[in-house]
Amino acid sequence: MTMKNQSNEKQASKANHYLTVSDLDGDTLLTLINRAIQLKQHTKAGLPFRPATGRTIGMIFEKPSTRTRISFEAAMYQMGGNVSFMPSRDLQLKRGEPLKDTARVLSRYLDCLVVRTFGQEIVEELARWSEIPVINGLTDQHHPCQILSDIMTILENKGKDIRGLKIAWIGDGNNMAHSWIQAASRLGFPLTLACPEGYDPDEGILKAARKEASAPILLTRDPSEAAEGADVINTDVWASMGQEDEAKERKKRFMEYQVNAKLLRLADPKAIVLHCLPAHRGEEITEEVLEGPQSVVWEQAENKMHIHKAILEWAMGL
Ligand code: CP
Ligand code: NVA
């Protein structure tokens, strides 16, 4: 999607956009997570929940997706609504139609937009002009929906207030790390990130989050330090979408940041392991850990659908 000929004339509309974790206060984030836990039970009990009847969401995706796409689609269909999936190459955006025109036109047809793209400025520009909520389904800088399903999974498994849990992030200071940092700040839990030199999270995001945080957000080069006594170990791919050219170099630089049995032994014996997926076995995580008893990744993937129901309900005011 191009950012050419864009303008800053208009302020973001009043719709319930969700572009970064920091867009919402801690209470709202927890309300969404608790609502998703409730909706999960509701779904499993086979009870109908169709508040989106007659509504349509649009999904503009410029990067591949298995989980985010299908879980949003399933969520919307189960809620009685419709989905229009729009690979960005099929839109006039590809031929240079401005984002601001696209946003205003789609606002006349649809009730919500879920967008997966490269730059954060693209979702910001869409939100600026859109009369309907814009939800960030992943950018290079943030993955705010994913973090909510991850915290939901943690609360379900650890059964306590997240503020008492030690959360570790091992690997790249990427979009997921940024959303974790903002969540730690909003929800007040301690977070330790272990990243190789040159792959730290964005300084501005870290600084802003620390300013408001009530628990420490630490950055270390040592994965053992982050894993030591942790209740939750998180990791993600070493080369994110769009960084395929760097994959070989990153593999060398990140090897000691692999989440393996040795690292996991340093964590609390009841620690759980999260990975937003897709996973690269033998790189950021071993097969043994991913398929092991402490891994909750399949539940975590399922929870994306439940959290997306809660997000859609909130965003569209259903
Ligand atoms: N976790 C996640 O966002 O997966 P997809 O890239 O498959 O959507
Ligand atoms: N950091 C990864 C997350 C994938 C869900 C990426 O952006 O590719």
Image (spheres, rainbow, N blue to C red):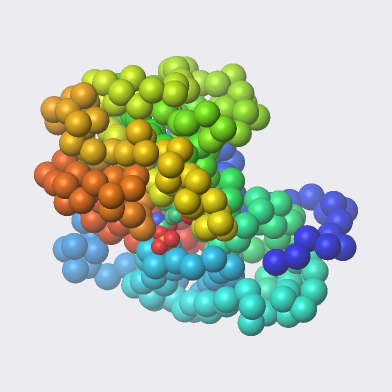
**72 and 220: which is toward the camera:** 220
Quadrant in which the N terminus appears: bottom right
Q: Is residue 102 above or below residue 145?
A: below
Q: Is residue 66 above or below residue 197?
A: below
Q: Is residue 131 above or below residue 287?
A: below
Which corner quadrant of the image does residue 20 belong to? top right
Left or right, 288 with respect to 200, comes to: left
Which corner quadrant of the image does residue 261 belong to? top left
> Is residue 18 something one can see in this rendering?
no
Residue 90 percent across, percent down from the top left: 64, 82
**176 and 15: which is toward the camera:** 176
Which corner quadrant of the image does residue 232 belong to? top left
Left or right, 259 with respect to 201, comes to: left
**122 and 10: which is toward the camera:** 122
Q: Residue at x 83, y 62 (%)?
A: 4
Residue 114 percent across, percent down from the top left: 55, 64
Residue 164 percent across, percent down from the top left: 29, 22
Q: Residue at x 48, y 52 (%)?
A: 247
Left or right, 216 with respect to 87, comes to: left
Left or right, 206 with respect to 229, comes to: right
